[in-house]
Image (tube, helix red, strand yellow):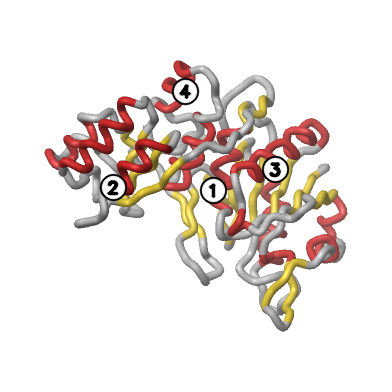
Amino acid sequence: MALLLIHTGGTIGMVASDAGFVPQQGVVEEFLATLPEGREVETLRLDPLIDSANATPADWDRIAETIAAHHDHYDGVIVTHGTDTLAYTAGALCFALEGLGKPVIVTGSMLPLSIEGNDGARNLRDAIAAAGHAQPGVWVQFAGRLLHGARVRKSHSRAFDAFAADPSDIPPRQPGERLTRRPIRTARIAVLAVAPGAEESILEHAAKTCDGLVLRCYGSGTAPDTPGVRAALATAQERAIPVIAVSQCPEGGMALGTYAAGAVLRDHGVIDGRDMTPEAAYTKLSHVLSLDDPQERAARLSRALCGEYTP
């Protein structure tokens, strides 16, 4: 069994200092050397390492490119990553690696490997095991659970059990006979939440200047039906930019058409994000906006690609 670990950064590879936790080279590699199963794992460190709070679509593309370059030489891949944006990276990899034929296991920790009582040791051991037996796709291994990469979200800011994901019958990969890496370009995407009395000019500005919008709506799909909101959504529709609506509720998802108060969304061609997480909606838009063909963009927006929502 040949496995590759790609260390991208994050708390798991840090040490304590007077200024707080800081990255240090060799932390992950030294821990692997203490594990019997670590002998099966080859390591590769991204340079420069990524502070996940500063991660960008360009970083997702760099990770996807690295996985694709080594895909045929290993039985599985482990990606260590900071927890702040781990869910975004997992989602982005689901969309970027079409036809993925190996398990890619994304993991990290809430405390560094260098700290006694950390969670990184368990997560890394579990990730190594998962990389050897999980079905092909992008998964998140955390706190003893293997989670769907296109449905995962960070649900707690401090607990070791920091991630959650709704189940899906569709594996976290796009089907394909062979691996095709879909490049991820940087697009202007706004993520905005509706709120009572919120300043509507922000939505109008985003509709005029952005390439796509993720709109976090109330409940199962309602939003303020005001002249300002209607004008902003009309601008987005005229510019033919995709707007995906997702729920502010962590459970249940969207169902546009349930309430008359959602008519303002339906009337302006807003896409029903169903039970997609905001992270999945954002990374799916990043993926779709990287495509040149408008018809292919529309086709991919209209269907579930890798289990990101319940069909």
> Does the residue at mark 4 contact the one at mark 2 (Cβ under 8 Å)?
no
Residue highlighted by disc 1: 88
* Eye-nearest disc, 1 or 4: 4
Can you tell which quarter of the image residue 155 is in? Answer: bottom left
Q: Earlier in the sequence, mark 2 or mark 3?
A: 3
Residue highlighted by disc 3: 63
Measured as percent of width and height from the top left, residue 205 is found at 35, 43
Residue found 66% across the figure and 25% down from its top:
180
Q: Earlier in the sequence, mark 1 or mark 3?
A: 3
> Does the residue at mark 2 contact the one at mark 3 (Cβ under 8 Å)?
no
Label 1, label 4: how far apart the Cα atoms are: 20 Å
Residue found 24% across the figure and 45% down from its top:
220
Can you tell which quarter of the image residue 21 is in? Answer: bottom right
In the rendered structure, which amino acid carries the disc numbered 1? Answer: Tyr
In the rendered image of this protein, does residue 159 appear above or below residue 184?
below
Residue highlighted by disc 2: 201
Q: Residues within 10 Å of mark 4 (few under 14, many from 20)?
A: some
Label 3, label 4: how far apart the Cα atoms are: 23 Å
Residue found 36% across the figure and 36% down from its top:
208
Q: Earlier in the sequence, mark 1 or mark 2?
A: 1
Label 1, label 3: how far apart the Cα atoms are: 12 Å
Disc 4 on helix, strand or loop? helix
In this rendering, would 171 be left or right of 109?
Answer: left
Disc 3 on helix, strand or loop? helix
In the rendered structure, which amino acid carries the disc numbered 3? Answer: Ile
Q: Earlier in the sequence, mark 1 or mark 4?
A: 1
Residue highlighted by disc 4: 297
